[in-house]
């Protein structure tokens, strides 16, 4: 049988995890990655640490030329795909080149959404999504002190931590509150307090209505009329799937995201999608939705890679999760924040800045939130994903989360290894 | 063939309530920080669970896959998953990715910390007084594998079959210029397959049970005459070696034919429904030595065929089980080196169907046979006897007997008799081995 040709749009974590999976399954098919960027593959999650100086560009690359060669894949850089033609099984690039594929993986990721702010075209502002953004920002930050970050999602929060670690005076303006998707108001408040302790000023429930130049600085006017000046303005109000080039191709989209089934396949045969662009089924309800986080990109890439080389593999569905290590604190959240008919155990230790919460239904864990609690976060993911029944031990899990979660995991592992034999 | 690495095995759930020695040692030796160790003691008195969690050194480490700065790698040589502390930025995504509690958090350094097997000398190993941590070194075994597994997948043997395990292992150690002689019995399922389809990549000859040794002799002599170096290996069951095929085996041993004769002893005619053989142990319940009425299982003791073979003046005789693969591999290599006579290896192959134990207990039963001295591991090179392994603290035969259904009827008096039998067999072996101790 002739070698098949797998084309991958993008070279982020989802794309790369697909390639690694194909090779792990001993596929010798041709693999080509095509990216808008001029750089080698890197992970967006590492960029804030470039700002704080905890890593350097030399350590950034997920793969160098040697590694790409070892993996037997070619990387086409600085080439933008502007159209997909499923009928002729080709993609069309901006420069007019057409590249054929047998199977296509769309892993083109996302791009920052641009907020509607008056006067934005007259001032210098930064976004934070690519290495080039990061380089520009770093250059701008030299010799400056005051930074405003608009937005408090994952990227914005990580960036704020990096800037605070590096000694900048940071103001965070957020339309709702910090990490709204991952932490409910009281947990979010605790995280916010820890940010304030570190010197951050947080303006929540505000939008930036207007920006203008003022004596070499940028004046920012909030929705309540208050105004202050800053040296650097960073906009990080969220990301949107980079799917403009897919419109009108017949590939089914919803709010810009590519709809995929539990094999990461789109509505069109031989076209797959994974990562920040894919609306994949979620774990609890099987409803298609975006989950633009690194671990989901990796697992979706794996599923897509396996199915593309003909190894039918099904996705268990994504579980929302996030971990934040900041100023010596750890906050992590996994799963659902609330659910109908679910029981919730919650305890807030304000003095010691501790927070714990479990949510479960019919003995199945649905979600957990811990701040400054000594637990192994991944074990809670295990308990949810494997649907380990807590039985009568939900309260024990709440009271002694570390030991109980490990016990439930170890016992389940033991039972699983036995049941393989039954 | 995949990669084989040394494994730090932690038997969780069997620890005493007040012991966290493994964790303490790791903290002292490695991080100096309370609560940050590569192994985590788990104490949950509410459910009476005491154990430990540790990194599995996964084949596809989830921690490695998510690391945004490639600070986590899996070493191709020793299989250890390591964190490059310099490269690590302390984002902690790995702690969220690892489902097994293998990724600790060092609050001082604000970075993750994990088990790296102390670069081959795990400190926690010596700290456990209860034998719950063991360091299983696969390298000495794997290094002896010379050939590819000659048997195709999907052989019809029972899941957990010790004969299958033994054969796959045996014929990966023997080089490719090997001929297999097998006969009716469980080994035939591998060499010839069901419905006569060949499933073995090595040349195989199936003989009648009555003349395996003499037929193998003929082929070996042919190649000797042609000046060609080949291994002729008979791999048969105990019914063949101990009972119906004994005469030609004895003759071949007497003549000193240069063949390797391996007896996979599952103590009975198991492929045909568990009839007793001359190798079936006393008290064993079989189809022809039942339990009930005046019957208490097999009334006779088993023949000790390896000893009988040794007293033929056979060049090399050894006993082995798959529970001690290093030991077996070494013996097989010695058997191959013999050029001036016959080699005989007696392999204990517990049969899960006939003996009555769970399919995941094959290796455990094999090991317990040795640990109770029911089946001592020894070898005899030209009449010189030597133990190759001696259990440090031998267990009573009761612990072996309890593992399976075929001894379930044994009463206390019989158990005492059984123990006496084991003891007297052992002292016979001791008198033969003299002062020659365990060779390590």
Image (spheres, grey):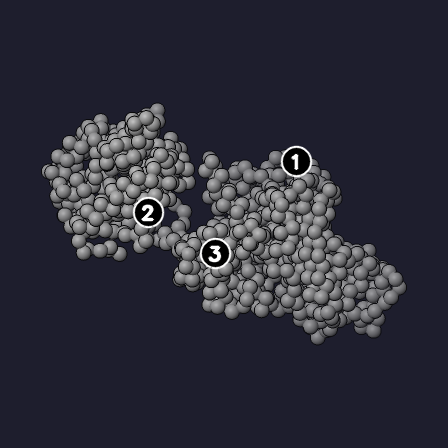
Location of residue B291 by image quarter: top left
Which residue appears at 79% of the width and 62% of the height? A173
Circle 1/circle 3 CB separation < 8 Å: no
**Mark pair 1, 2: CA separation:** 66 Å
The crowd level at tag 2 (other Cα within 10 Å; few <14, some 14-19, many 20+) is: some
Position of A144 relative to B182 (above/below): below
Residue named by callout 2: B396
Residue named by callout 1: A267
Position of B263 relative to B87 (above/below): above
**Mark pair 2, 3: CA separation:** 23 Å
**Mark pair 1, 3: CA separation:** 56 Å
Which chain is home to disc 2?
Answer: B
Residue B233 percent across, percent down from the top left: 23, 38
Q: Given the current orientation, which residue lies at the most extreme top position?
A: B195
Q: Earlier in the sequence, mark 2 or mark 3?
A: 3
Which chain is home to disc 3?
Answer: B
Residue named by callout 3: B16
Residue B355 percent across, percent down from the top left: 35, 34
Mark in front: 1 vs 3: 3
For mark 2, give the secondary structure: loop
Q: Given the current orientation, which residue lies at the most extreme left position?
A: B255
For mark 3, give the secondary structure: loop
């Amino acid at each position: 049988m002739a070698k098949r040709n797998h084309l991958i749009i993008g070279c982020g974590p989802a794309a790369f995890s697909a390639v690694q999976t194909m090779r792990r399954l001993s596929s010798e098919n041709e693999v080509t990655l095509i990216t808008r960027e001029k750089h080698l593959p890197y992970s967006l999650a590492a960029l804030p640490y470039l700002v704080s100086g905890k890593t350097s560009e030399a350590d950034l690359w997920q793969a160098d030329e040697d590694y790409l060669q070892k993996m037997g894949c070619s990387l086409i850089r600085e080439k933008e795909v502007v159209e997909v033609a499923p009928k002729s099984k080709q993609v069309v690039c901006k420069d007019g080149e057409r590249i054929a594929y047998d199977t296509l993986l769309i892993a083109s990721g996302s791009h920052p959404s641009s907020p509607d702010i008056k006067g934005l075209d007259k001032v210098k502002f930064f976004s934070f999504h690519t290495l080039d953004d990061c380089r520009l920002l770093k250059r701008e930050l030299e010799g400056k002190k005051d930074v405003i970050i608009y937005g408090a999602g994952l990227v914005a929060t990580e960036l704020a931590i990096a800037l605070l670690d590096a000694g900048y005076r940071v103001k965070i303006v957020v339309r709702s509150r910090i990490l709204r998707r991952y932490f409910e108001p009281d947990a979010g408040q605790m995280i916010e307090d820890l940010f304030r302790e570190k010197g951050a000023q947080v303006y929540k429930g505000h939008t930036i209505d207007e920006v203008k130049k003022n004596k070499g600085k940028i004046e920012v006017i909030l929705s309540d009329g208050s105004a202050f000046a800053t040296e650097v303005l960073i906009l990080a109000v969220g990301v949107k799937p980079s799917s403009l080039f897919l419109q009108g191709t017949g590939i089914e989209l919803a709010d810009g995201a590519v709809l995929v089934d539990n094999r990461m396949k789109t509505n069109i045969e031989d076209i797959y999608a994974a990562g920040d662009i894919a609306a994949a089924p979620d774990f609890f309800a099987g409803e298609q939705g975006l989950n633009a986080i690194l671990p989901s990109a990796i697992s979706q890439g794996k599923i897509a890679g396996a199915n593309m080389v003909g190894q039918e593999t099904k996705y268990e569905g994504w579980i929302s999760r996030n971990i934040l290590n900041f100023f010596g604190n750890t906050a992590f959240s996994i799963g659902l924040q609330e659910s109908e008919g679910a029981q919730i155990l919650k305890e807030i230790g304000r003095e010691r800045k501790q927070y714990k919460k479990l949510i479960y239904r019919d003995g199945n864990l649905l979600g957990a939130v811990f701040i400054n609690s000594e637990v192994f976060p991944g074990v809670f993911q295990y308990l949810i994903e494997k649907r380990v029944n807590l039985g009568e031990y939900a309260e024990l899990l709440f009271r002694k989360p570390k030991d109980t979660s490990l016990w439930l995991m170890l016992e389940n592992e033991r039972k699983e290894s036995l049941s393989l034999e039954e | 063939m995949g990669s084989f690495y040394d494994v730090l095995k932690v038997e969780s759930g069997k620890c005493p309530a007040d012991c966290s020695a493994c964790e303490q040692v790791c903290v002292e030796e490695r991080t100096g920080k309370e609560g940050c160790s590569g192994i985590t003691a788990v104490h949950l008195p509410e459910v009476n669970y005491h154990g430990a969690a540790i990194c599995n050194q996964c084949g596809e480490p989830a921690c490695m896959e998510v690391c945004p700065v490639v600070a986590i790698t899996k070493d191709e040589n020793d299989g250890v998953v390591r964190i490059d502390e310099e490269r690590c930025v302390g984002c902690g995504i790995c702690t969220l990715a690892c489902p097994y509690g293998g990724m600790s958090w060092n609050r001082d350094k604000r970075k993750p910390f994990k088990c790296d097997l102390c670069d081959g000398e795990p400190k926690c190993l010596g700290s456990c007084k209860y034998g719950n941590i063991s360091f299983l070194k696969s390298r000495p075994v794997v290094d002896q594998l010379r050939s590819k597994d000659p048997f195709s997948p999907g052989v019809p043997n029972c899941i957990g079959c010790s004969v299958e395990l033994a054969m796959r292992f045996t014929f990966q150690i023997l080089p490719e210029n090997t001929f297999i002689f097998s006969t009716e019995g469980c080994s035939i399922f591998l060499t010839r397959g069901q419905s006569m389809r060949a499933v073995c990549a090595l040349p195989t000859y199936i003989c009648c049970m009555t003349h395996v040794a003499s037929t193998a002799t003929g082929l070996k002599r042919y190649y000797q005459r042609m000046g060609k170096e080949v291994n002729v290996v008979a791999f048969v069951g105990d019914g063949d070696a101990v009972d119906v095929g004994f005469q030609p085996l004895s003759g071949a041993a007497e003549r000193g034919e240069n063949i390797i004769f391996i007896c996979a002893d599952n103590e009975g005619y198991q492929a045909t429904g568990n009839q007793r053989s001359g190798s079936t142990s006393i008290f064993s319940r079989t189809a022809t030595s039942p339990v009930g009425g005046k019957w208490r299982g097999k009334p006779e003791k088993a023949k000790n065929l390896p000893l009988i073979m040794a007293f033929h003046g056979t060049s090399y005789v050894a006993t082995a089980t798959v529970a001690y693969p290093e030991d077996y591999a070494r013996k097989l290599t010695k058997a191959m080196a013999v050029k001036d006579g016959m080699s005989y290896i007696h392999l204990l192959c517990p049969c899960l169907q006939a003996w009555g134990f769970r399919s995941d207990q094959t290796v455990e039963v094999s090991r317990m046979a040795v640990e109770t001295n029911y089946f001592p591991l020894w070898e005899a090179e030209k009449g010189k006897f030597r133990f190759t392994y001696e259990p440090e603290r031998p267990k009573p035969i009761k612990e072996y007997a309890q593992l399976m259904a075929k001894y379930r009827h044994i009463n206390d008096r019989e158990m005492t008799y059984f123990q006496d039998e084991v003891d007297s067999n052992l002292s016979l072996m001791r008198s033969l081995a003299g002062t020659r101790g365990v060779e390590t």
